[in-house]
Image: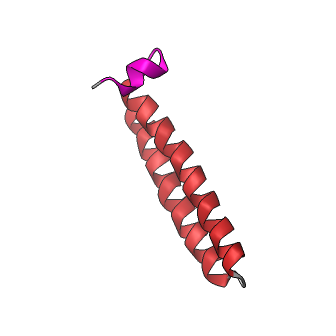
Amino acid sequence: MLRVKKALITLLMVIIWLITLAIGINAMSFKGRAAILLTGILVNGILGLAYSWLAKRPGSVREWFKL
């Protein structure tokens, strides 16, 4: 089940990047492109944290950053 969740998160991350690029190319202004890019980075960052949490299953934030 863990592998399925990781694969699903990875697939979602790729889809988010594709959508971000597709919408960003059609944006008319620089501010619009910047907002779209930052939104894509934010969503992928949250998905990256979820992926990391699935891999480590930390009890606290401190445990998350221990090597």
Q: Position of residue 54 (x, y in %)?
A: 43, 30
Give the residue displayed 64% in from the left and 58% down from the top.
39
**Number of numbered discs present?**
0
Q: Which quadrant is the C terminus positioned in? A: top left
Q: From what the image shows, is residue 28 above or below residue 14?
A: below
In terms of depth relative to the viewer, which is nearer, 35 or 14? 35
Residue 46 placement: quadrant: top right
In terms of depth relative to the viewer, which is nearer, 35 or 22? 35
Asked if the magenta segment contains residue 64, the reply would be yes
Give the residue displayed 43% in from the left and 19% down from the top.
62
Q: Which quadrant is the N terminus positioned in? A: top left
The answer to whether residue 37 is visible is: yes
Asked if the magenta segment contains residue 51, the reply would be no
The answer to whether residue 1 is visible is: no
Give the residue displayed 60% in from the left and 68% down from the top.
19
Q: Position of residue 41 (x, y in %)?
A: 55, 57
Give the residue displayed 48% in from the left and 16% down from the top.
60
The part of the chain drawn in magenta is 57-66
Q: Position of residue 45 (x, y in %)?
A: 52, 48
In terms of depth relative to the viewer, which is nearer, 50 or 1? 50
Farthest left residue in view: 67
